[in-house]
């Protein structure tokens, strides 16, 4: 991770912390990896990432009462307002990072941006994101408290979404991140957390995880997470 990119990420979080936004939103995606280094302190853990995508999971708009003009907040850091796709999904762009907001897709899905007028942004609804909210952790860095998915949920979620990727490079990165975190959890003697996360989700999701691990030739991990009697 480039130092300038890392610094910019922290500055985004600082701006959000000033407006108490971090009380309600979850940092998701590959930028969780540098923050997991604190969770995995004492063991070898590869936290280097190569992505510009900085993703935040927002709660249901009706339950989000905070007010903050996020485009204005990040303008001071060099971010400009941009749009993605034909539907007008808002992103905040910088040469080093792209900030995007996501929400949990409910029911049959909704192929339109979900507006957050209090924040001056909208969000993309995606499947499987509720898995990331089932168990979370908090890390404190430079007096800023950041909420992340538990590493077990993060890793298994990566195995699911990797298989939905059209971009082969992003698919490989998701698979690599998943195995990296799973191996760290095993080294930390937290296999039970992997099993808990695995058995907390529907059978169809479990099948997708097993399919991904089989594609990677990770038969031992398949046996480990599917063993309910261990």
Image (tube, rainbow, N blue to C red):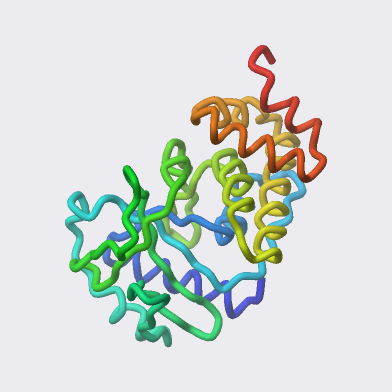
From the viewer's perspective, is 51 left or right of 22?
Answer: right
Occupied quadrant, residue 145: bottom left
Marker count (numbered): 0
Tell me the residue at 58%/30% (across/down).
198
Residue 154 locus on image (x, y percent): 56, 45
Residue 168 locus on image (x, y percent): 70, 64
Q: Nearer the viewer, residue 196 or 106?
A: 106
From the viewer's perspective, is 62 left or right of 167?
Answer: left
Above or below residue 151? Residue 112 is below
Q: Nearer the viewer, residue 121 or 162?
A: 162
Tell me the residue at 49%/50% (across/down).
139
Tell me the residue at 67%/24% (across/down).
226
Q: Quadrant of the N terminus?
A: bottom right
Q: Quadrant of the C terminus?
A: top right
Residue 99 locus on image (x, y percent): 44, 72
From the viewer's perspective, is 157 left or right of 122?
Answer: right
């Amino acid at each position: 991770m480039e130092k300038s990119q890392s610094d910019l990420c922290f500055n985004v979080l600082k701006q959000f912390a000033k407006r108490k936004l971090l009380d309600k939103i979850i940092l998701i995606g590959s930028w969780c990896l540098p923050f997991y280094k604190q969770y995995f302190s004492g063991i070898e853990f590869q936290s280097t990432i190569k992505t510009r995508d900085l993703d935040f999971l927002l709660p249901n708009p009706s339950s989000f009462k905070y007010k903050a003009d996020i485009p204005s907040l990040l303008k001071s850091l060099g971010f400009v307002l941009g749009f993605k796709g034909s539907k007008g999904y808002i992103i905040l762009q910088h040469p080093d990072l792209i900030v995007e907001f996501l929400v949990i897709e409910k029911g049959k899905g909704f192929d339109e941006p979900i507006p957050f007028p209090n924040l001056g942004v909208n969000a993309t609804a995606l499947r499987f994101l509720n898995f990331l909210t089932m168990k979370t952790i908090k890390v404190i860095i430079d007096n800023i408290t950041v909420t992340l998915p538990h590493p077990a949920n993060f890793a298994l979620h990566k195995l699911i979404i990797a298989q939905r990727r059209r971009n082969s490079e992003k698919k490989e990165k998701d698979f690599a991140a998943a195995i990296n975190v799973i191996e760290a959890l095993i080294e930390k003697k937290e296999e039970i957390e992997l099993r808990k996360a695995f058995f907390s989700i529907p059978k169809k999701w479990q099948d997708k995880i097993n399919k991904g691990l089989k594609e990677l030739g990770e038969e031992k991990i398949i046996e480990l997470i599917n063993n309910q009697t261990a």
